[in-house]
Image (cartoon, coloured by chain):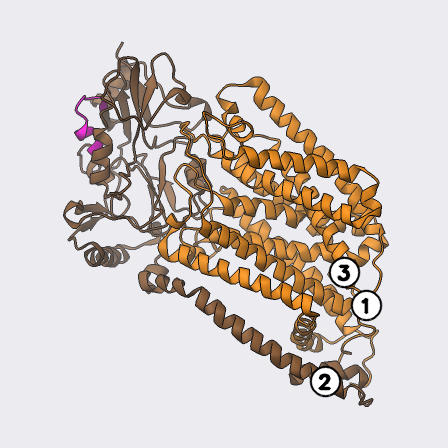
Chain colours: A brown, B orange
């Protein structure tokens, strides 16, 4: 207020006629001050729910660096913290690991559309294996019931609830295509998602800011956002978890199919393949000339989805001739 | 102290010392007003607080409180963000005549457009933050500290151009007002280069924002080379429309007359941009529907509904009617003479662009989804509250900034002398 008086009176120094106005201004200033104080108090009350951030996000988590910048020591501490938090929040004892790509390996998936009958076991297996939210039956896979004679997805339906297979239909599961030219990775503003040497595209769930630009960019509807904190009963939690794959994701971040890297980098098959009762799914290392997947790609007339977009998927489809 | 007169440059130290006093004085003046002003500000504060509370709830409970889904993963926030980028860019339609064509009368009030840009950009940044699933990780976006995926991600370009545009306008407005406050003739070297830069920058903010969408091959509705030009033309409708309304209001409030010249020029600009905008819409609609096929599905959904899903149809036709009526009104001579008709025409043009460049642009990008599933979207109450809160904040900033400018530019003599 002293500032104000000086400023206002300075052009009229010595004239003295502004005194009544000064008094008025002071009263007005006092009222304004009271209004500002009230406003700030109301603002503080309005944003009070933000207290959940310090309650849920520890200082260590807040300051945590990007996965690629973590040392082994950092990882050890972070994994221990995440295991502890899972115990606190879900009651389950889990083990976090850090499977790295096997040098020389590149994973490729293929689906035999003549065999797939739309039973949906792959979606169930994905839901359990990857610790998805239970209420929404979340899964990285969508199975489409296609109309025979058309490859147009406009004639497909993913929400069918009748017995399968239907005579005039065929069934096409769609999940992340692990593209060699992935639009989702290009658009991420913070490099929270990237392609690893074995072709798998992963997400650092502790780095993603949740802008969902990748969800808009993906032509295959492969990405999922955690609109809420996943709810999973303690006894159903898969304790074998990996930092970049199936650990329980925090609210507000994007996730996607990672070819079950916590299994496949150990030489096992993805959960969706193991669950498939028809044998429609073939998975393996394209660089191994003896692998089944190599035989399929060499001997079947395979195709990829939306080839015209130039995304170069590592996910193939074929029919038995 | 005695030797310092107005035509002598201030010492650097004195200038720095006086800047906080200038802000304090300006804020004091800007918060003086009649009862109408206080009612206006009180109402805006109330709406803003409701919005702030809704946002805080969204952060604590998760984005589940919005009605967005994995199918429609951007909604009301990004729609408003896109539109407000246009409003921010629209102010340049005052800057170009004022500085490139040396329109003296426009020059006198060009600050209205620049202040509008400041308020609009602040709103844009608020909408982006409101849309983030993890606002606590905002620092990951800061160049140097986080990991900034530049130049690949168009979103990082947008972060740069939007913040750059905000800084440019803050500098230009701040400098001109501060010099006036001190009673010193502004030195062109300190603002004209920035003004010239801001002209290109204004074009860039809306172009980059269009590139955000039109670069996505999986979304045929956005994947059009016409998107950036369409963004710009509709920006040059909505921005000037809001400025025209502002000028009508200012004429009532400010005691001194404001010249009609700038308004006439802006009307003439809108006359052209509304027509160009409509031509572009027709051109896109023709290409979509004459060709047909799966590529047409989002446009089909938007204008006529798809397989019985038609929530956006009333919206877009409202926008079309508003656009056409506004265009007709702007083309008549009445808008020049009758300020009521001018306000109606401007409001219609503004709301028309808000629908068309907001929900009408973002939502059909997601419907049908990339795998041709149809999941519709209506914003939740929380989303409406947050959106209203951000609009209220924007209007508050705009009001205060303009009142500060009026106080400074209508002062008879410098408010302080260099000391």
Which chain is disc 3 placed on?
Answer: B
Residue B365: assigned label: none
Same chain under badges 3 and 1? The reply is: yes
Mark 1–mark 2 CB contact (< 8 Å): no
Q: Residues within 10 Å of mark 2 (few under 14, many from 20)?
A: some
Q: Is residue B294 magenta?
A: no
Mark 2–mark 3 CB contact (< 8 Å): no
Look at the image and tell me in which quarter the C terminus of chain B lies: bottom right
Same chain under badges 1 and 2? The reply is: no
Indicate which label's residue lies in the foreground, 1 or 2.
2
* Real-space CA distance between mark 2 and mark 3, rounded to the nearest whole angstrom: 38 Å
**Residue B199 visible (yes or no):** no
Judged from the image, the secondary structure of the residue bearing numbered disc 3 is: helix
Q: Residue at x 73, y 52 (%)?
A: B245
Name the spot of residue A203 as percent of width and height, x first: 34, 44
Task: Tell me the magenta residue range.
Answer: A270-281
**Residue B88 visible (yes or no):** yes
Which chain is disc 1 placed on?
Answer: B
Residue B185: assigned label: 1
Indicate which label's residue lies in the foreground, 2 or 3.
2
Residue A22: assigned label: 2
Judged from the image, the secondary structure of the residue bearing numbered disc 2 is: helix
Q: Residue at x 40, y 53 (%)?
A: B134
* Real-space CA distance between mark 3 and mark 1, rounded to the nearest whole angstrom: 12 Å
Q: Nearer the viewer, residue B134 or A69?
A: B134
Q: Nearer the viewer, residue A296 or A90?
A: A90
Q: Residue furthest top?
A: A321
Name the spot of residue B191 as percent of width and height, x first: 74, 59
Q: Residue at x 33, y 61 (%)?
A: A57
Residue B189: assigned label: 3
């Amino acid at each position: 207020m002293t500032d104000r008086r000086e400023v206002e009176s300075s052009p009229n120094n010595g004239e003295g006629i502004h005194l009544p106005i000064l008094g008025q201004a002071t009263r007005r200033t006092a009222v304004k001050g009271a209004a500002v104080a009230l406003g700030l108090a109301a603002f503080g009350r309005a944003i009070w729910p933000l207290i959940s951030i310090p309650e849920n996000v520890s200082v260590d988590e807040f300051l945590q660096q990007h996965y690629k910048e973590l040392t082994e020591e950092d990882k050890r501490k972070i994994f221990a913290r995440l295991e502890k938090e899972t115990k606190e929040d879900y009651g389950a004892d889990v083990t976090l690991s850090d499977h790295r790509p096997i040098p020389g390996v590149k994973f490729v998936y293929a689906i035999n559309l003549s065999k797939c009958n739309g039973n949906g076991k792959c979606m169930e297996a994905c839901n359990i294996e990857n610790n998805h939210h239970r209420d929404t039956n979340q899964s990285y896979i969508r199975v489409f019931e296609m109309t025979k004679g058309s490859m147009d997805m406009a004639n497909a339906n993913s929400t069918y609830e009748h017995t399968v297979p239907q005579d005039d239909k065929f069934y096409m599961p769609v999940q992340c295509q692990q593209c060699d030219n992935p639009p989702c990775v290009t658009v991420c503003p913070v490099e929270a998602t990237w392609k690893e040497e074995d072709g798998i595209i992963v997400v650092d769930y502790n780095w993603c800011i949740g802008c969902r630009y990748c969800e808009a960019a993906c032509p295959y509807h492969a990405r999922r956002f955690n609109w809420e904190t996943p709810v999973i009963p303690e006894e159903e939690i898969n304790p074998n978890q990996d930092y970049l794959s199936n650990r329980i994701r925090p609210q507000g971040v994007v996730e996607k199919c990672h070819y079950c890297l916590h299994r496949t980098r150990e030489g096992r098959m993805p959960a969706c393949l193991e669950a498939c009762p028809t044998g429609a799914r073939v998975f393996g290392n394209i660089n191994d000339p003896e692998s089944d997947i190599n035989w399929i790609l060499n001997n079947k007339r395979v195709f990829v989805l939306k080839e015209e977009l130039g995304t170069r998927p590592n996910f193939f489809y074929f029919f038995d001739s | 102290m005695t030797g310092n007169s107005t035509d002598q440059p201030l010492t650097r130290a004195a200038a720095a010392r006086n800047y906080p006093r200038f802000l304090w004085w300006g804020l004091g003046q800007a918060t003086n007003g009649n009862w109408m002003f206080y009612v206006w500000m009180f109402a805006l504060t109330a709406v803003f607080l409701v919005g702030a509370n809704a946002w805080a709830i969204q952060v604590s409970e998760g984005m589940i409180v919005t009605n967005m889904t994995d199918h429609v993963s951007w909604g009301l926030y990004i729609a408003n963000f896109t539109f407000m980028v246009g409003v921010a860019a629209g102010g340049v339609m005052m800057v170009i005549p004022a500085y490139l064509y040396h329109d003296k009368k426009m020059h006198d009030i060009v600050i209205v457009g620049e202040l509008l840009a400041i308020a609009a950009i602040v709103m844009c940044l608020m909408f982006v933050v409101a849309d983030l699933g993890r606002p606590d990780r905002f620092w990951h976006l800061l160049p140097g500290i986080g990991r900034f995926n530049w130049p690949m991600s168009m979103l990082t370009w947008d972060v740069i151009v939007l913040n750059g545009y905000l800084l440019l306008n803050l500098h230009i407005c701040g400098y001109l007002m501060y010099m006036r406050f001190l009673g010193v003739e502004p030195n062109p070297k300190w603002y004209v280069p920035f003004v010239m830069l801001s002209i290109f920058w204004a074009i860039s903010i809306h172009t980059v924002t269009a590139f955000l969408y039109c670069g996505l091959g999986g979304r045929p509705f956005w994947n059009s080379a016409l998107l950036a030009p369409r963004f710009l033309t509709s920006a040059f409708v909505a921005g000037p429309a809001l400025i025209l309304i502002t000028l009508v209001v200012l004429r009532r409030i400010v005691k001194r007359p404001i010249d009609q010249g700038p308004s006439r020029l802006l009307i003439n600009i809108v006359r052209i941009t509304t027509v160009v905008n409509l031509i572009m819409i027709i051109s896109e609609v023709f290409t979509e529907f004459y060709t047909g096929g799966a590529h047409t599905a989002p446009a089909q959904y938007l204008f006529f509904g798809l397989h019985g899903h038609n929530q956006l149809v009333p919206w877009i036709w409202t926008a079309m009617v508003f656009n056409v009526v506004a265009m007709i009104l702007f083309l008549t001579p009445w808008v020049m003479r009758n300020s009521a008709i001018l306000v109606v025409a401007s409001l219609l043009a503004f709301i028309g662009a808000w629908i068309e460049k907001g929900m009408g642009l973002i939502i059909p990008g997601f419907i049908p989804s990339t795998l041709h599933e149809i999941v519709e979207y209506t914003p939740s109450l929380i989303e409406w509250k947050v959106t209203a809160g951000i609009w209220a904040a924007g209007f508050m900033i705009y009001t205060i900034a303009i009142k500060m400018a009026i106080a400074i530019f209508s002062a008879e003599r410098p408010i302080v002398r260099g000391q």
